[in-house]
Image (tube, rainbow, N blue to C red):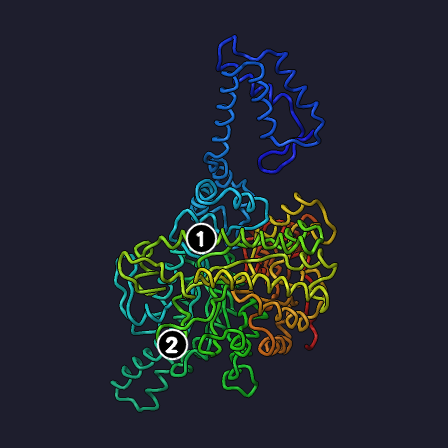
Amino acid sequence: MQVIKRNGAFVDFDPSKIKNAIEKANNEVSQGERATKAEVKEILTYIEGLGKKRLLVEDIQDIIEEKLMSFGHYELAKKYIIYRYNRALVRKANTTDLAIKELIDGENEYWNTENSNKNAHVVTTQRDYIAGITSTDITRRFLLPEDIVKAHDEGIIHFHDADYFAQNALHNCDLINLEDMLQNGTNINGVMIEKPHRFLTAMTIATQLITAVSSSQYGGATITLTHLAPFVRDSYNYYLKRYQSRGLTQEQVEKFAREDLKKEITDGVQTFQYQINSMTTTNGQAPFLSVCMYLGETDEYKNELAQIIEEVLKQRMQGMKNEKGVYITPAFPKLLYVLEEDNIREDGKYYYLTKLAAQCSAKRMVPDYISEKVMKQLKIDKNGNGNCYPCMGCRSFLTPYVDENGKPKYYGRFNQGVVTINLVDVALSSDKDMDEFWKIFDERLELCHRALQIRHKRLSAATSDVAPILWQHGALARLKKGESIHELLHNGYSTISLGYAGLYECVKFMTGHSHTDNGEGKAFGLQVMQHMNDKCKEWKAAENIDYSVYGTPIESTTYKFAKGLKKRFGTVEGITDRNYITNSYHVPVFEEIDAFSKLKLESEFQKLSPGGAVSYIEAPNLTNNIDAVLEIIKFIYDNIMYAEINTKSDYCQVCGFDGEMQIDENFEWYCPNCGNRDHSKLNVARRTCGYIGTNFWNKGRTQEIKERVLHLDNKDA
C-alpha cells in the first residue's frame, strides 16, 4: 500500500510512523488512558486490511482518531489530535532557514542557477536572494490561497517573482520617462537633480537614475536614446560658443566644435556602458536595462540621435574587457534597434547605421530588431493610428494607450506582474479528450486570473511614498506625496500579463502534429492562442484592467515545469522526455527549419502575444558574412514585429580559445581546445529567453541550449 502525502508525493506505507505518533501521544496521558500494544496492532491491522492500493495521509489519521475513541481512549485521541495539529503548524512554519543556509554554503541548486545574470556566490546577490527566500515563504504562507500555491508547486501555473511579492509596492517592468526627469529635474534620495546642460553630464545622470529606478522594481526597464539627443546639441552649442570667443573663422569654429563633440559623445557612451555594467542595484545585479534606438521618435534631433546610435553600436561591437583584459560580450544593456524606411533601404540616409547594427549582431548578439512597419500594423490605438515603441526589459510590450490630450503615451508606463499557465499540463491532464481539454483550460485560466487579481490588489494598496523616484519624481509619474497609484493600474495605463509556455508540446500531444505544420497543428495552436486573448478581453471588460497575453521568458521555470510534468504524467515520448519545455510559441529548438520560414511562421503567433514576445534564429559565426545578416534584418522588417539573431560569443581564460564552448552528455560546459570546465575561467554568452545570459544555467536550460539547431548556414543568404 502507498500513502499519498500532502504535497502529492507517493511513499510506501510505514507502520512505524503510526506507532511513533501514538507513542508520543501516550506519553502525554495517564497510564490508564494509554493505548496498549495490542490496540496499536489492531489499528495497523485494520488499515492494512482495507486492501487499498493508495490512501491519503489525512484519511489514515482520521482512522487512528476514530479507533482510539472506539477503544474509549478519548483523552488519548484528544492528544493525538493536538499532536496532528502541531505537526500541521510545523509544516506551515517558517521554511527559510535551510534554504538560506544552503544558499550561503553554495549548495542550493535552484538559487545557484535561478538567473543567468546573477552570481549567487557574491554577497550582493546573496543579500537579494536571502530577502527573496523570506519573501517567498511569506507569500506562500500568508498571501496566496492554498490552491494557487499547490498549482504553482506542481508546475500547473507559475506565480512569477514570489521572491519580491511580500512587498506590496514592487511592480514588474517599465519604460522609464527619462525625458521628464532630465528636462524637468528629479530627485534621488532627497537630493535634487537639476536639468543637465551637456551630453556627458546627461549620460552620467541617466545611469544614476536607471540604477535608482531598477532598485525600486524587480523587472527590466527600458530607456530611449532619443531622450538624450537634445543634450548632444547643447554640447555642440557649448563648443561653438567657446571657440567663437577665440577669434577663429566660422569654418574653424565648426570644425573644432565637431571634433570636441565627437570626443564627448565617445566619452559619454563609454561612461554609460561602464556605469551600467559596474553598478549593482538592490536586486544584486547590474540594472536589467534595454536601450532603444529609434530614429523615428524625433525629427528635430534626428542627426544628434544618429551620432549617439553610431557610437553605441561601435562600442558594443568592441565589447568589454574581462578580468584577463580580453574583450568579451557583455550582457547589458540590451539594445533595441528599430527598422524604418530611412535605415532599411540601401539608399536610405541612415542605412549605414543598419550595416553597423548587422556587424554588431554578428559579433555580440545585439541589437534586437523591431520593425516599425509591422508594429504599426499591429499596435493600433483608439484613434486608429499605428504606434511603434520599445519593449520593457527583454520582451514585455505595453498595449496602445492615448492620454487625456489624445496623444499616444508609452514612456512612464509599466507592467504590474505575470502569472504563467503551463499549456503542456493542460493537454496531458485532458488525455487527448478535446472537450476535456477546453474544460481544463478554462479552469486553469481562471486559476491564473485569480492569481493575477491578487497581484493587482496587492499593488493597488501602494502610495507614491513607497518609491518616490517612480511615482513622485518623474520615472513613471508626478503624483503628490501620499497619493495612491491606484488610477495608474486601470484604464489601460499599465498592463498585467497572462503568460503561457509549452505551446509546441501542447499541440503535439493533442493533435500529433507540431504547430509548425501549416495544417492541423498550426490551426489548433492558433486556436489556443486566440482563446487566451479572448479571456483577457473578457477580464479587461469586466474589471478595467489591461490583461494581456505574454510569451513568458521562463528561464529556470522551463526546467521546473518539465520536472513537474514527469512527476505527474511520467515519461511521454516527445512531450516530457526532456529536461525543458519550449518557451511560448517558439518552434522547438531541435526542429529543423530555415530562418525565413521560422520567422514567417512565428509572426502569426507573435500577433497573438500582444503583451510581449520575441522570435529568434540561431546562426553560426557570421562576422565574415554580414550580407547574410542584412538579408535577415530586411526580412524581419517586412514580416515580423520583433526578432533577434543568436550567435556564439565565448572565451576560455585558460588557453585563450575564443571559439564556441561545448556541452557534454551530462550538460556540463567545457572548452573544446583545452578541456577547461571551471565556470569561473570560462566566458560563455548565450541568448536566454530574449536576453543574454553569462552566469550559466540549470540543467534543463543547458540541455535546451545544447539541442538548438542552426536556422541559417554560413553561405550567402
Question: Which residue is label 2 attached to?
Answer: 406
Work out which quarter of the rendered image holds the C terminus and state it: bottom right
User: Closer to the camera, 659 or 534?
Assistant: 534
Work out which quarter of the rendered image holds the N terminus and state it: top right
Task: Please name the residue shown 47% across and 62% down the image.
Answer: 540
Q: Position of residue 372 (x, y in %)?
A: 52, 77
User: Closer to the camera, 597 or 617?
Assistant: 597
Q: Position of residue 486 (x, y in %)?
A: 36, 58
- Residue most toward the top? 32
Instruction: Give the structural element (helix, strand or loop) at label 1.
Output: helix
Instruction: Assess whether mark 2 and mark 1 are in contact (beta carbons under 8 angstroms).
Output: no
User: Closer to the camera, 666 or 523?
Assistant: 523
Question: Which residue is label 1 attached to?
Answer: 455
Which mark sits nearer the N-terminus, 1 or 2? 2
Task: Please name the residue shown 34% across and 82% down the image.
Answer: 257
Instruction: Give the structural element (helix, strand or loop) at label 2.
Output: loop
Q: Position of residue 599 (x, y in %)?
A: 64, 71
Q: CA distance from mark 1 to mark 2?
A: 30 Å
The amino acid type found where label 2 is placed reads Gly
Q: Is residue 648 placed above or below 99 in the rendered structure?
A: below
Task: Please name the residue shown 42% across and 68% down the image.
Answer: 223
The quadrant in which residue 472 appears is bottom left
